[in-house]
Image: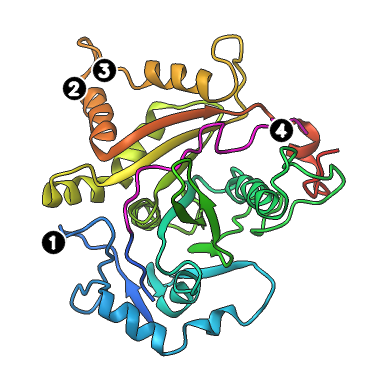
Amino acid sequence: MRTAGRDPVSAGLQFPKDRSTQRPANRARFVPAPTRPSPLHPYCFCFEGGGSMLSPQRVAAAASRGAGDAMESSKPGPVQVVLVQKDQHSFELDERALASILLQDHIRDLDVVVVSVAGAFRKGKSFILDFMLRYLYSQKESGHSNWLGDPEEPLTGFSWRGGSDPETTGIQIWSEVFTVEKPGGKKVAVVLMDTQGAFDSQSTVKDCATIFALSTMTSSVQIYNLSQNIQEDDLQQLQLFTEYGRLAMDEIFQKPFQTLMFLVRDWSFPYEYSYGLQGGMAFLDKRLQVKEHQHEEIQNVRNHIHSCFSDVTCFLLPHPGLQVATSPDFDGKLK
């Protein structure tokens, strides 16, 4: 399997400017609103039953009701924080599960950096998150530069597998929060978030937009996971999914989202743009360029993306090889 040995931070997964997120902690159902919420803030959720927002008071109340219940197991693992009600096409936030993670004593007063991966289903989102987990655990335990570890070790973490059927539902976050010291000496809490894949046969467009919007509104870094290229329909879907961001921007007079990273998997044209961040940025500049002769619709898509995110980057990854892509027995070993 071909995997670059660079650490994700130096390779482009840089921590953005600090922006505190609300740390919600019972359960409330989220139903996509057909009309504009009023007001809509990028770090709040609107729920069925009055459009209530998650407030600091509700966070504290949930914590006092026993925020540690979802952390009973001493072994870290994925925790479901947004559940899917498939028959009703609605979503349910488990505030207690979320509070059990974000209100732990050693991180509750730190700024949070949420790294989320979103995109179409069966494109390896959970797989790439598990490599991020491997890196973070390597830095926590030893700080070794060889963060890829033993090539005979299976890849574990968020549930992943080969095949054509969806694996992840709703939104999950890793139960262990990593404390990372930034170059300036400030400590932040890093949270990894996995999301349900879009465009499967059971989800409506509204379902897909809701998952993407929720993950983007709560993320510091939203990784848009794509296969082979950045196509025009990828950009159009991104525009649709971030429409909540445009509405939020109208309310708070600033760009509603922080960092968007296009992660292009199975990149087949390294002779045009090299693998990694440098080649990715050159490719992205060309792909998002606004030209006079372009149709107004195409220009609007690009302008919308730039208006919604404070920073937009791109990273190009090589194909991992046919054994990884086609073997039903592949378990993530690098050798």
Name the residue located 52 percent from the left edge and 63 percent from the top edge: 172
Name the residue located 29 percent from the left edge and 80 percent from the top edge: 58
Task: Residue under label 2, please give it.
Answer: 296
Q: Which residues are magenta?
A: 1-20
Dot 2 and dot 4 residues touching (CB under 8 Å): no
* Residue at the farthest bottom position: 65
Q: Nearer the viewer, residue 114 or 38?
A: 114
Which mark lies nearer to you, 3 or 2?
Answer: 3
Q: Name which of mark 1 and mark 3 comes first in the sequence.
A: 1
Distance of label 3 from label 2 (alpha carbons): 10 Å
Task: Residue under label 3, please give it.
Answer: 290
Distance of label 1 from label 3 (alpha carbons): 31 Å
Q: Which structural element holds mark 3?
A: loop
The amino acid type found where label 3 is placed reads: Val
Q: Main secondary structure of the magenta part?
A: loop
Task: Residue under label 4, please give it.
Answer: 3
